[in-house]
Amino acid sequence: MPTAGIVIIGDEILSGKFVEENAAFLIGELRALGVELRRIAVIPDDVDDIAATVTDASRRFDHVFTSGGVGPTHDDVTMAAIAKGFGTTVTRHPDLEAKVRGYWKDQLADANLRLADVPAGAELVYPGGRSESGPLHSRGKDQIWPVVAYRNVYILPGVPTLFRRKFVDIRDRFRAQPVTAARLYIDIEEGELAPLLDAVVAAHPVVRIGSYPRFSERDFRVLVTLEAADAAEVAAAFEQLAASLGTRVVRREEPHPVGAA
């Protein structure tokens, strides 16, 4: 499975002025796309911190998504920080500048032109488009407001409505083999369950198995989840565990692909 990291940027998140929404949204999207999320970092509007965190994530994961710090004000430093982290400069992209000027027309403020500043060598990813022609030439069905990407880093706004809209526009770019998931609701204590789980894990190492005790449910005591990109392995692990538990299984959710909403 391809891997991903999320970097949430903003003093307003760390101070509690706003509740973080974008990572919670992206977790579900990436799971549905078959992308394995490995890390979420929440960091301040600090150029050096952003530069170090984003470049580290870029080295470690296939895709990196940033949220926040994109705009015309003094605390919008994400573009400059990413440029610094990768050892490049910030440049004013002519296509974006034309779009900014066309959008605001005679209402344009000089600060709005900062929305056209990107790391030199960045790619513009348009809704529905895939990168086929190299930097600055990706095109899709909608040519209005693209997502700026530098290498494998996708630079998204922090406003939740805009973040969601922009990610949904480009999400097919990241679609991989879908995850197959299954669940068993079990009336058993985890200590008794553990050796049975060990046997299934040993037999099906590619399947991720989670055991989650519940204390407020009346009909079951443990929820077990099984997930993998290999549907046959999930089905085999599911049946092995269910057979070993017998009548202790209260309810089953059969293996099924996790689909995007």
Image: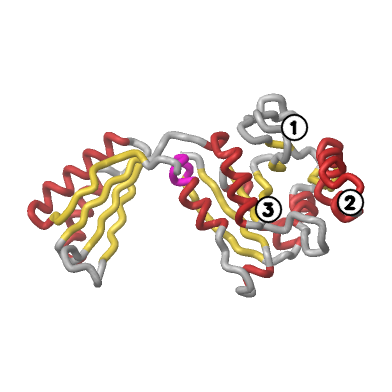
Q: Is residue 205 above or below residue 193?
A: above
Q: Secondary structure at mark 3?
A: loop
Q: Is residue 1 left or right of residue 103?
A: left
Q: Mark 2 is on which residue type?
A: Gln
Q: Is residue 34 magenta?
A: yes
Q: Quadrant of the C terminus?
A: top left
Q: Earlier in the sequence, mark 1 or mark 2?
A: 2
Residue lying farthest left? 247
Residue 21 is situated, as x and y percent measured from the top left of the image, at: 55, 60
**Viewer-side residue, 87 vs 177:** 177
Question: At x 61% / y 49%, what residue is drawn?
Answer: 65
Q: Earlier in the sequence, mark 1 or mark 3?
A: 1
Q: Mark 3 is on which residue type?
A: Pro
Residue lying farthest front? 106
Q: Which residue carries the number 2 mark?
A: 107
Question: At x 62% / y 59%, what residue is drawn?
Answer: 8
Q: Earlier in the sequence, mark 3 or mark 2?
A: 2
Q: CA distance from mark 1 to mark 3?
A: 21 Å
Residue 33 is situated, as x and y percent measured from the top left of the image, at: 47, 40
Which segment did they paint magenta?
Answer: 30-35
Q: Which residue carries the number 3 mark?
A: 157
Q: Residues within 10 Å of mark 3 (few under 14, many from 20)?
A: many
